[in-house]
Amino acid sequence: MKLALSDQNCLTEGWRCLVLSLWVSLGHLVLQADPTLSFNRDIRPILSAYCLECHGPDGQQRKGGGKQGLRLDTLQGATEDLGGVSAVIPGDADASLMIQRILTKDADDRMPPIEHGKSLSLDQVESLKTWINQGANYEGHWAYQPLTRPSIPARESLGSEPTHQSRHPIDLFIVRALSTLQQNLTDRADPYLLARRVALDLTGLPPTVAEVDAFVSDQRPDAFGHYVDQLLRKPSYGEHWARWWLDQARYADSAGYADDPPRTIWGYRDYVIRSFNANMPFDQFTIEQLAGDLLNHPSMDQLVATAFHRNTMTNNEGGTSDEEFRNVAVVDRVNTTWAVWMGTTMACAQCHHHKYDPISQEDYFRFFDLMNQTQDADRRDENPRVELFTESQLDQKTLLQKRQSHLRSSLETMTQELQEAFEAWESSLGPPVVWERLSSWETRLADHSSSQEPTALENGAWRLPGSSTPYSATWQSKTKSVSFKPMTALRWSLQHEGASKSPAQEWAFSTPSLYWTPPQGQVLPGRYLRISLPGKQRMLSLAEVQCFKQDQNLAPGSQVKQSSTDFGGAAERAIDGLTDGDYHASKSVTHTSQSDDPWWELDLGRSEAVDRIVIWNRTDGGLYSRLDGATIEWMDENRQVLWQHVWKEAPRVSVDLSVDGRKQIPLAGAILSYRDPSTGRLIRLESKGKKGEPWKGSLPPTQVMNLDLVFEEPLLPEDGGELLLQWEQLQWSQEVSWQAELQRSEDDRLVTLARLSPDLWSILHLPKEDRSKEQSKHLASYYLSIAPALAEDRDKLQRVEASLASIKPYTSVPVMRALAPDQQRTTRVQRRGNFMDLGDTVEAGIPSIFEASLDQPPRDRLALARWLVSNKNPLTARVMVNRLWEAVFGQGLVLTSEEFGSQGDLPTHPELLDWLAVEFVDSDWDIKHMLRLMVTSEAYCQSSISSDLGYEEDPANRWLGRGQRVRLSAESIRDQALFV
């Protein structure tokens, strides 16, 4: 049959023009029976191809006409009064300005404009004129119309006797369309060929010889149906159709972009396989993938399902903006959701109003807001994630968790015996601790930013100066005498002197360190000092290293080196005399590159009797903890280690180490407290910073502040030894003075008190009658956690929890997690799609064209998912049955499976499409049912060999007068090779 479009137009429009030509040709056949033109079938494709780019829904770019521009896709716009004329005058094509402009010889007035490089054919112009003369009846876009089940054509109404007597609903629709072409279905394919065809379509694998032989020899009337059911039960069915879905989910085992690093997300792939094999209803499948995390008490599978939208690419290249690529991921989620479920090119509205469909840019970002409220943020670790365990692991975890619950219950139950033991324990801690003042101490300012020195008082105390400006200082206090009594704790007591100009005193200082030097400490002459940092991919930085021989620092001028140098942090910086640890401000901090086991070393040049080593750490950015686990070694000229010190936790600022036998006294705890002047109660203070950071706070004036340093083991000083207390005062801005004194105690209860948390310590120091019920319960719970009678159960619990911790997941999957209500992002229109150029604020919703049928628009992903599969949305069912049809027949009833809008193709069999869509919904969204329905039709089973007339009349087989010839995908070809 001769095509209606000119060859020139066909070359310009490509394949779309070919399809349109076919429609016009076939339309003539339909017109013989029904001369009334349909707007959707006959006119909208012409307007969409030639007119709507300038005269469509996009009001921002619309041209011609009045103030709002000329709009041709609606009756109101097309018939608007344009000064006595209208683009379309129903019933009078010759008077319609649209027809006049199309046919004019004036190049300046011709439509479409010459520069667009396309023009309408005579047949298209005739169609427009006929439609206008018939009344210019507009129709809503076919894909947006509500779903209703069409009547199945009656077998008897199809005219001449057909070759086949199939009563299958699909065949009846197909045969009715073919009868218009005076054609019919071809004969059924060879059974061996048919067995292979359906096996490949349903499982992606060929059948075995035994399976084919069993099918061919099966004499039952529904032998093919039984064979299909057998294929649908195979595990390979889920694997094959999961691949079909994963393509739509843009699944990949890598993160994308330039580096394309591997990612672990295959747990989602397995979820999809399980879902297809279990024949999960598609509405449930939709809800779990788009909003499984928002369901009540979601299962692990429902959380894993949300990885559908974690398949977006992530970019961790240095210098990239996490927010930019998080925004890109949200855009991808919007576009993918609309393409997969709605068959709509939503991406067109990201930068401007859609030119062909009634979707505005505001509509786009209202939907964007639905996808914009999740926790993921283009992180390298892909959080949030869930961990997956095998069934046996889960069984083991369940058993252990039951034991854990039982033991915890036992450990939290206060029996009568435990109550008596608790009361005895509490009573033993009741009497006040006795403290004795030490007078044989001297205090000095080791390093400071203030010119004032501490002053000794006649009563054995010391006065520490205040200052009108903040300053920092390192204080050292040590013994003058050579003998001590045994002690379990040392108290540093600080009392305010004089009036204060502020109601409270601001202070900040680090936890003091305590050192014991035995009598006649042995000096160890050495030459090399090495500081190393064991571990993988670590960096070592030092502000200053000092080696003292008595009071002389021997380090300056020595030879130094380090394992590597990066960021300009040369090894010599550690002996330049500057102790400021701010790397960027002082330019005096060393820096190795990131490497395994970095080190720094000093060579004095000869053996020296060094007695003290002081190491100053890097302090900026909280990076002092980089030195955690460092090893300090003092070696002789033969590099034999004479003395070694290992830091579990590095000093925040500096540490003073002795190589003459001095050692740091391990502390059970440090208690900082004062007595509230209004209540008389003891108040214990706590650091407000992270672990290792200083105490910070304010202290009421005229009060005594006590810092109790409790030893892990009682100290039994020997005659001739020395005790040294050192602390860093990081801030003290009062314009007043304080006096300090040191006190000792030999009360062994202090170890127990020091190990209490601040709140427990405060409760214990309250009279029982003043405690609240919650405080009493808290103290009793603490006792149960240390009660000797429960030690065995605590050991059992520890072993159970260790066993639980040893059960490791076999994989993890990135998932969607909603932001908390108080963390929700504000979404704004992005001008031209630029995430940095923001316009008006928008609220979550769907395009307004669909909201007309809704009482309440979706406001989160769960409401959205439920709307997508509700009877108020006509698109999802149509789109999905078309995708299934495309997978089985090689091409969809709508050729453009991801474009059901104005730019897409019309369905070849609109009633069949709607019948299948309603059947899909009425079957509870049963995918296996729909596939069985399709492959058991004669339209599917027919031979692909047809008459020459069939090929001539329908070369693309859009009307299904013969079986489709479908090429295998690359993945399927590979599977064939592996299978055989």
Image (cartoon, rainbow, N blue to C red):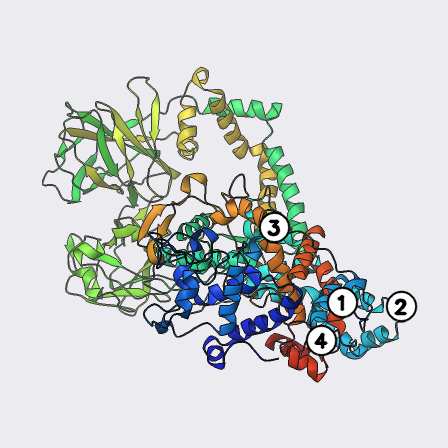
Disc 1 designates what residue?
937
Left or right for 200, reference 416: right
- In primary-sequence order, the first of circles 2 and 3 is 3
Residue at x-position 32% and y-position 18%: 680
The x and y percentages for residue 282 are 65, 54
Figure check: 592 above or below 973? above
* Residue type marked 4: Gly
Disc 2 designates what residue?
220
Nearest to viewer (mark 4 / mark 3): 3
- In primary-sequence order, the first of circles 2 and 1 is 2
* Residue type marked 2: Arg
Residue at x-position 45% and y-position 18%: 768
Q: How crowded is mark 1: few (under 14 residues within 10 Å), some or many (20 or more)?
A: some
Disc 3 designates what residue?
146
Nearest to viewer (mark 4 / mark 2): 4
Which disc, if any, is residue 963? 4
Report the quarter where the C terminus lies. bottom right
Q: How far is the residue under mark 4 from the one under mark 3?
A: 31 Å
Res 508 visible: yes
Q: In front here: 437 or 504?
A: 504
Figure check: 383 above or below 107? above
The x and y percentages for residue 156 are 81, 63
- In primary-sequence order, the first of circles 1 and 3 is 3
Q: What element carries label 1?
A: loop
Q: How far is the residue under mark 2 from the one under mark 3?
A: 41 Å
Q: How far is the residue under mark 4 from the one under mark 2?
A: 24 Å
- In primary-sequence order, the first of circles 4 and 2 is 2
